[in-house]
Image (tube, rainbow, N blue to C red):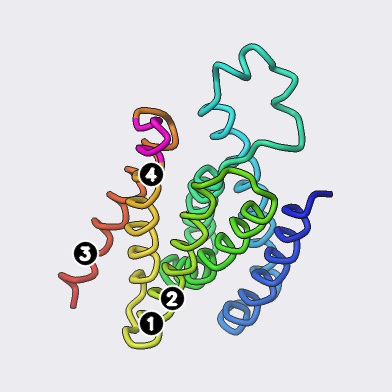
Amino acid sequence: MSFYSEILFVVVFIMIFWLRQKIIHMYNKEFFWQLTFYVSISSLLGAKLIHVMHHSFYYSINPREIFSGSGFSILGAILFGIITLFFLSIIYKANFDHLADKIFLALPLAQGFGRLANVINEELLPHATYEMFFNFLNFGVLLILNKYIKKDGLITSVYFLNYGIFRLIIEFDKGDLMKVLSIISFVFAIYGISKLVKIIFRL
């Protein structure tokens, strides 16, 4: 197991524990663990699928590599995770915005530590360094908003707006502006700003 995997395992464990404390008081334990299971599985599948789509040429030549233990996209994990969360909130009649806010408040901190592991392993440089600092900064911004402005959906909207724009800049710097990750980043930014506009007009 690589150092990155060890860090990721610890971060995911801490994040699940933190979310349990934040969510379980509103819903029962069964709902929380079902939520954790289905969102985790869909995020893992989404992370692999979007990574393969983004590197479709490579995997068309090396199809066996699709089933390797490496090669995942955080954008794919986020995309499939929030879609799954949306449908689960409908099925269980839960407050989607409230649940999403709890998750996306903690997520940039987890992402920051994940990129820190990349930096220590000297992987994906220099973009891993940029993203590490951005995620920690994004976490700080969301933490302040969460403390002073109590509005369901605000944390989620600002997270997607900030991260979507940042990833577009990163993909542009990589020269991948017209690829899958750039399209998803653009969708994230649009989702964030549209959701934010709706919240502002409801105030």
Name the residue tied to disc 2: 140
* Badge nearest the viewer, 2 or 3: 2
The mark lying in front, picked from 2 and 4, is 2
Q: Which residue is mark 4?
A: 185
Determine the residue positioned at 39% across, 65% down: 156
Q: Secondary structure at mark 3?
A: helix
Dot 2 and dot 1 residues touching (CB under 8 Å): yes
Q: Residue furthest bottom?
A: 148
Residue neighbourhood size for the residue with mark 2, other residues' Cα within 10 Å, grouped as few (<14), some (14–19), many (≥20): some
Magenta stretch in the rendered image? 171-177
The CA distance from mark 4 to mark 1 is 24 Å
* Front position in the image: 24 or 94: 24
In the shown orientation, is residue 25 left or right of residue 79?
right
Above/below status of 147 relative to 131:
below
Given residues 151 and 124, the one toward you in this image is 124
SS class, disc 2: helix
**What amino acid is at disc 4?**
Ser
Amino acid type of disc 3? Lys
Q: Residue at x 69, y 16 (%)?
A: 62
Residues tagged 2 and 4 counted as in contact (Cβ below 8 A)? no
Q: Report crowding for label 4: few under 14, some 14 to 19, many 20 or more residues within 10 A (C-alpha).
A: many
**Residue 176's image quarter?**
top left
Where residue 11 appears, x then y in whole percent?
68, 66
